[in-house]
Every structure is written in C-alpha cells, then in structure tokens.
Amino acid sequence: MTAMVHFNVGGTRYEVSRSLLDMHPNTMLARSADELWHEDPESEIFVERNGDRFQYVLDYLRDGRAFLPIGVPKDAFLGDLEYYCLEGVDESKIERKLTCAAQVLHDLRSEIDSWDADFEARKTEKRALEDQMKGLELQQACIVLVKECAGRYLKDGDLLLFLTTEAEEDKPAIEAAQKICQCSNPKDALDQCNAYLDKVGLMFAPLEATYGAGYEEDFTVRMALVDDEDNDLIEC
C-alpha cells in the first residue's frame, strides 16, 4: 500500500504519496515529511501558503511542468516553488492553461463536426425510411385498388365502373386511387398495379382522374381494365 503524507496548506488538505516526495528529497516538503523531522506519519503537516496553488506545485513535482489558469499569477507560483525549495525550475515549463484551452476547443470542434456528420447520416437514414414507408403505403394502395376493381369485374362482369367519393363503399378504393394519382410517379404505381393484375390476366390502361373543386370531397377515377383474353375494356 502506498504510504501517504498529509499536508494542510493554508487550510486546504492534500494527500501526497511518499514516493513522490522521495523523488525530490531536497525540497522543504520532503524534509518536512522525513521521519527524522516528523515522527508520526499519520499526523498532518501544516504549511502557511496558498492552498489553491499547491495543486499546481504537485503537478510540477509529478510532471516537471504546470499549466496555470488565468487566475493564478505566474510570479506567485514561482514564489511558491522557491518557498518549497524546488531546484532548477524551468520557467518555460510553466504555461498558461490558455494553450490547453485551445486544444480543448479544437477537440470540441472536432466532436461537434462528428456530431454534425452523425446528424446528417441520421437525416439520410430518416429520409430513406420515409421513402421506404411511402413505398409501402403506395404498394398497399395498389393492392386495395386492384382488389376493388378486379373484384367488381369478377363479381358483376360490369364493363363500365366508376369510383367516386359520393359512394360510401368506394371510399377505400378512392383513397387508394388518390395516393396513386398524387404520388411522384403514377406510371410506376400503375406498373405495380399491373404486376398484381397480370396474375388474373388483366391490366390497367393509363390512369385518368378527375378532381372537382375541393377534390377530397369530389374525386372521380376512371380506369380501364384490359382482359387479355378478349381485350375488352373495363373502366372503373
């Protein structure tokens, strides 16, 4: 277990390893902690100096350099080192924390750049997920519309069918048709519809939609189904 020496520097308490003091045997601190000077290692050694600056004295003892904050005068710190009898002090190794702050600022900017890159990546991922969701919604709309139109044809054999918001039973298919008409590429959506219809030997002719004033309440879709067997047209 590392032996510790207890210092009370101007009312601020510190624990300093005996091994660190042994590295600087000629300092007042090491001499104060020597068993010949101080018979009880567990007792506290009081030093009448500035307690806040003592942490930087320890930095200098450990690392051979110290970084002082703006609020610590360099002359006062050099006075502390002289008081503690440190020999061969290299003033060039006593720097302002402003240098460190510049490095911290650089690291912070790098971190922010990393956050920005991650944010952009997440935005791209979000857009991709939104596009995927729109694609799934459009696929669902195609299935609903195909099911409605083909189902009516197979049930009634009626060659002339209209979807309109005026009919309550048409609403699911109308909503699907609206999504298809308003998508970025209706032709691709029509091709998707035809991929389903092809399984029963049918296909859609080009989509034609009519909007009234406030088309959400007045929307009519005319779509022609082509029967591969006899090429009859079915409008719905």
Image (cartoon, rainbow, N blue to C red):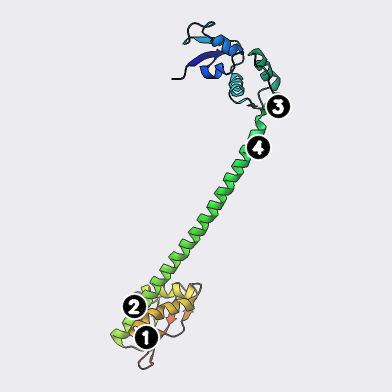
- Point out the tag, 4 or 1, that comes first from the N-terminus: 4
Give the label on residue 102, or none: 4
Question: Residue at horizontal 34%, vertical 78%?
Answer: 148
- Point out the tag, 2 or 4, that comes first from the N-terminus: 4
- Give 189 or 125, whichever is nearer the viewer: 125
> In the drawing, does residue 78 fall left or right of residue 185?
right
Label 4 is placed on what type of residue?
Answer: Ala
Give the label on residue 161, or none: none
Q: Which residue is mark 3?
A: 92
Under circle 2, the secondary element is helix
Q: CA distance from mark 3 to mark 4?
A: 18 Å
Label 3 is placed on what type of residue?
Answer: Ser
Q: Which residue is mark 2?
A: 147
Badge nearest the viewer, 3 or 4: 3
Label 1 is placed on what type of residue?
Answer: Leu
- Point out the tag, 3 or 4, that comes first from the N-terminus: 3
